[in-house]
């Protein structure tokens, strides 16, 4: 068997571009009268080429197949005898002249291990300090497909071009329930973990590590202080053992498969779990999780199991500066996280985790450009005492990380430990972005007019209006010696934070339901310190993790820095994985 990926580029004559993010689908529509195009599909060991989407009045079709062979005819069947990359050139001759469409294709035999071995993709043999340095990052075709659904809803060429750029930016894969490991219908048609990793091998270049980002997000009684993504496991009915054996063990077995030994894995552990144990014990569900050590034991097992392989890198979620930035919270945070890691029964001790990630799925700016000193005085009052900050001296993620880094090293963590920042939605561009410091002599007005974060309250976490894409993923944004290892896009931009419909109070099949913070009409009156502020949430939002077209367009509009216009007219290669290379993984070890 073979695997095929095809993409078609224009030349000479206008054409309809096939959706390269998925095989066996019609090409995109075009408003131009004359076009030359073809589709490539896989049947058994044969490639079927079909130029019937060409609309010019054609007399002849001539194919160059990239291996020295040529054929004629509108449709043909061909079999490549060797694995490799091939360029297919179709020349269509008609009454108005000639048109050319060019496609690139990769053929991989069903013995994928042998083919990969020929590329000499050596397994990881050392554990590096910064796994992002010098790597390529896996481009998730499932995300590209979601972006494609938005492309089909707009007609502005510049916006389409920016959306195309998004299809080439690495985003993390969220394994938010057991079904997500296996993909398919039970996971909204998304790929299985194994399929992702096979595609990652196909994307890997000779001599360059390929990094795959996975978010592990399936603890029992998950998101104890919120409702939008409670999950499907319950500690009361054996959820912790299910989490260990049917979730963590299975993921570990997949990524430890020898086929994937050349890949590098960054594992982001359980967003929002441990931070809830620091500040939200007033909530009955969080008190229950704390009393039974649900989050502690779950994270410890994940650390113990996932730290065994040399090519896995573990980053624990540690909230954001607007959540844990107060001095008292910071002290409790460091002590609790040290307790979790020290008790993980790992051979690596405090070195078992490589660091922490902040701002996962959140909106806190990386740097508050015009508010750099929390102790600056405005009319005799310090800036940190303004209503928006409430005496929290950490206004942004960079300051928060620099303070945490020093405290963690003091508590016994490795001096090599690093931080990641999720910058997927903290750009805060657009017309409302401040251009300079305020000139106001009133403290709250000064802060309101100077801050980049435009939310009504720092605790507003659900689909807030006016948000924008942030800095693109990059390694060492402040140099090799700085504690920030990389900016990454952990939250795929355009995936909702939670459903906005108050009538969806019952959990769906994914454990997701309505939360008041996702209601545009709700004003915060909940918890020990209610905000009294509107949520600023967008209307018409779908369930958490589902595609939200209107939010995606807003994020592009408000991106800071502005999103680039892609010169690549196609979505990423999407390999159709034959059943013969798929293995069934279980919790057996």
Image (tube, rainbow, N blue to C red):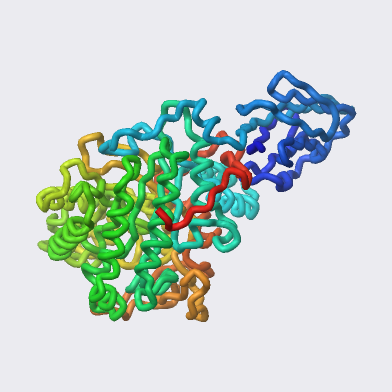
| Viewer-nearest residue: 451 or 302 | 302
Residue 38 placement (x, y as % from top left): 75, 36
Image vertical order of residue 12 relative to residue 319, above or below: above
Residue 358 placement (x, y as % from top left): 29, 54
Image vertical order of residue 498 relative to residue 554, above or below: below
| Viewer-nearest residue: 577 or 30 | 577
Residue 129 placement (x, y as % from top left): 25, 38
- Image side of residue 478 versus residue 94, left or right: left
Q: Quadrant of the N terminus?
A: top right
Task: Tell me the residue at 25%/65% (across/down).
Answer: 296
The quadrant where residue 71 appears: top right
Task: Tell me the residue at 35%/69% (across/down).
Answer: 240
Residue that lies at the very extreme toward the top in this rendered image: 68
Residue 318 placement (x, y as % from top left): 26, 58
Tell me if I can see residue 534 in this picture: no
Tell me if I can see residue 289 in this picture: yes
| Viewer-nearest residue: 222 or 529 | 222
| Viewer-nearest residue: 306 or 93 | 306
Residue that lies at the very extreme toward the front in this rendered image: 589
- Image side of residue 426 versus residue 586, left or right: left
Instruction: Count the labels in the image.
Output: 0
Task: Tell me the residue at 67%/44% (across/down).
Answer: 23
Image vertical order of residue 63 relative to residue 515, above or below: above
């Amino acid at each position: 068997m073979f695997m095929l990926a095809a993409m078609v580029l224009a030349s000479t004559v206008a054409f309809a571009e096939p959706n390269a993010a998925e095989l066996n689908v019609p090409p995109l529509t075009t408003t131009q009268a004359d076009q030359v195009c073809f589709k490539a599909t896989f049947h058994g060991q044969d490639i079927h080429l079909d130029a019937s989407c060409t609309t010019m009045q054609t007399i002849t079709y001539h194919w160059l197949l990239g291996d020295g062979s040529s054929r004629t005819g509108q449709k043909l069947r061909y079999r490549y005898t060797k694995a490799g990359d091939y360029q297919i050139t179709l020349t269509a001759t008609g009454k108005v002249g000639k048109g050319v469409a060019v496609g690139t294709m990769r053929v991989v035999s069903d013995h994928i291990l042998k083919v990969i071995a020929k590329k000499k993709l050596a397994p990881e043999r050392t554990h590096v300090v910064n796994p992002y340095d010098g790597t390529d990052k896996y481009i998730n075709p499932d995300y590209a497909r979601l972006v494609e659904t938005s492309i089909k809803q707009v007609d502005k060429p510049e916006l389409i071009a920016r959306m195309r750029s998004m299809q080439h930016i690495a985003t993390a894969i969220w394994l938010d329930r057991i079904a997500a490991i296996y993909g398919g219908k039970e996971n909204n048609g998304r790929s299985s973990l194994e399929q992702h990793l096979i595609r990652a091998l196909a994307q890997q270049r000779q001599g360059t590590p390929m990094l795959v980002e996975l978010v592990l997000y399936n603890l029992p009684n998950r998101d104890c202080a919120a409702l939008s993504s409670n999950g499907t496991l319950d500690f009361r009915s054996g959820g912790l053992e299910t989490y260990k054996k049917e979730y963590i063990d299975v993921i570990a077995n997949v990524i430890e498969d020898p086929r994937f030994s050349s890949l590098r894995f960054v594992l982001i552990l359980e967003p929002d779990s441990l931070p809830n144990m620091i500040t939200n014990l007033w909530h009955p569900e969080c008190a229950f999780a704390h009393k039974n050590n649900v989050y502690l034991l779950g994270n410890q097992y994940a650390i113990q199991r996932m730290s065994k392989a040399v090519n896995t890198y573990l980053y624990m979620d540690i909230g954001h500066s607007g959540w844990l930035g107060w001095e008292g919270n910071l002290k409790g945070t460091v002590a609790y996280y040290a307790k979790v890691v020290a008790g993980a029964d790992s051979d690596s001790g405090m070195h078992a985790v490589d660091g922490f990630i902040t701002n996962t799925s959140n909106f806190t700016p990386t740097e508050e450009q015009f508010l750099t000193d929390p102790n600056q005085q405005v009319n005799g009052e310090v800036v940190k005492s303004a209503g928006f900050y409430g005496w929290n001296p950490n206004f942004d993620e960079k300051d928060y990380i620099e303070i945490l880094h020093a405290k963690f090293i003091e508590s016994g963590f490795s001096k090599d430990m690093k931080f990641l920042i999720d910058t997927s939605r903290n750009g805060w561009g657009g017309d409302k972005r401040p251009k300079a410091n305020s000139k106001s002599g009133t403290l709250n007005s000064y802060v309101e007019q100077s801050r980049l974060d435009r939310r009504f309250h720092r605790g507003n976490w659900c689909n807030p209006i006016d948000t924008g894409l942030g800095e693109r993923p990059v390694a060492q944004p402040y140099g090799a010696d700085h504690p920030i290892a990389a900016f990454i896009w952990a939250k795929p931009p355009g995936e909702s934070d939670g459903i906005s419909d108050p009538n969806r109070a019952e959990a769906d099949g994914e454990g997701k339901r309505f939360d008041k913070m996702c209601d545009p009409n709700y004003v915060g009156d909940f918890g020990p310190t209610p905000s009294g502020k509107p949520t600023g949430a967008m209307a018409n939002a779908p369930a958490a993790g589902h595609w939200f077209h209107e939010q995606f367009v807003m994020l592009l509009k408000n991106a800071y820095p502005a999103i680039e216009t892609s010169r690549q007219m196609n979505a990423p290669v999407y390999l159709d994985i034959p059943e013969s290379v798929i293995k069934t993984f279980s919790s057996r070890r």
